[in-house]
Image: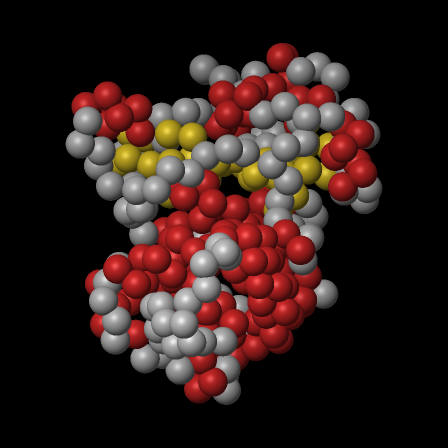
Amino acid sequence: MLDVTFARRSDRTLKALTGLRASEFDALLPAFAEALTQQTLARRSDRQRKPGGGSQYRLACAADKLFFILFYVKCYPTVDVAGVLYRVHRSRPNRWVHTWLPALEEALGHKAVLPERKIHEVETFFARFPQAKDLFIDGTERPIRRPQEPAKEKHHFSGKKKRHTLTNLIASDTDRRILALSPTQPGTRHDYALLKDWPCPPRLPPDVVIWTDSGFQGIKTDYPQLTVIQPQKKTKGQPLDALDRFLNRQRARIRIRVEHAIGGIKRYGALTQPYRNHRPHMDDQLMLVACGLWNLHLKEVD
């Protein structure tokens, strides 16, 4: 069985297994333990078992449970592999994941590191992020298994990645912190189409600068009230001159912050390996948790 005590002796080992350093793990542990307690109280029934009755968990303490669920998100093992590592039947790691992943999400919410999902008004955005003056928006895709149904297969095929994917939009600030996350959509959806369905960014005031890549062509025409900075594209028969190329490089150097944020969440195997879970909305939950873990890392570093 994986030994959390041994893994915590080295930040390098713990980070390779969970994505967090020891200080970040310790900062998250109390909130996770409280979430487990509330989870247990919520599902407790009136029936009382005899002492020693019921399923005998191999993982008794909150630290072991937190280590397991972080290990799952970071390395994304199959339940068969997790069962071998923990010397239990494959059904038990499957149950652990579906029980403790919501607790991890709740703990990250208590730490105030989860990105916003339900911002529909500008006032709500500024109440949550009063210092936000620059907003960097970009899309990210992650692979899934090829769907068996022809309709779903066509709906999830990404022409950009040449494979079946899921996609999200991410909005980050200058500190690479992920402020907002769009709902998970099939890979066939274009980044700009996702932005149109996202209520908050199109309603931002002009004093908030929105940085995008060339995939959001048309945003200045459709939303003239926004302050948008994006690369200049060459037109047919009219290539970019030296000044335009220089300005594009300067814009890219500033906009790279959102790419760093995406790279931060892509440290987790649950987002880079083909998604294989079948429970509804778990794809979105894994994305949200990975963003929260990345924000927790940035918060503890600061």
Q: Is residue 198 above or below residue 21?
A: above
Q: Is residue 76 left or right of residue 120?
A: left
In the image, what residue occupies the spot 40% across and 53% down?
A: 98
108 or 53: nearer the viewer:
53
Residue 78 position by quadrant = bottom left
Rendered view: 219 above or below 245: above
Q: Which colour scheme appears in the figure?
A: secondary structure
Q: Position of residue 110 (x, y in %)?
A: 67, 55
| Left/right of residue 77 with respect to residue 237 in the rendered view | left
Q: Position of residue 207 (x, y in %)?
A: 81, 29
x and y, in percent, of residue 46 in the image: 50, 56
Instruction: Name above or below for residue 254 compared with residue 122.
Output: below
> Residue 12's spot in the image, x, y percent?
48, 78
Question: On the rendered image, what quadrant is the N terminus found in?
Answer: bottom left
Question: Do we see residue 30 in this rendering?
Answer: yes
Q: Nearer the viewer, residue 237 or 302?
A: 302
Residue in the foreground of this view, choosing between 101 and 217: 101
Identify the image quadrant of the C terminus.
Answer: bottom right
Residue at left 45%, top 41%?
Answer: 284
The residue positioned 26% from the left and 60% from the top of the image is: 91
Q: In this figure, what is the number of numbered marks? A: 0
Q: Is residue 39 visible?
A: no
Q: Is residue 115 above or below residue 66?
A: above
Towards the viewer: 278 or 160? 278
Q: Residue at x 19, y 23 (%)?
A: 150
Residue 76 is drawn in which quadrant? bottom left
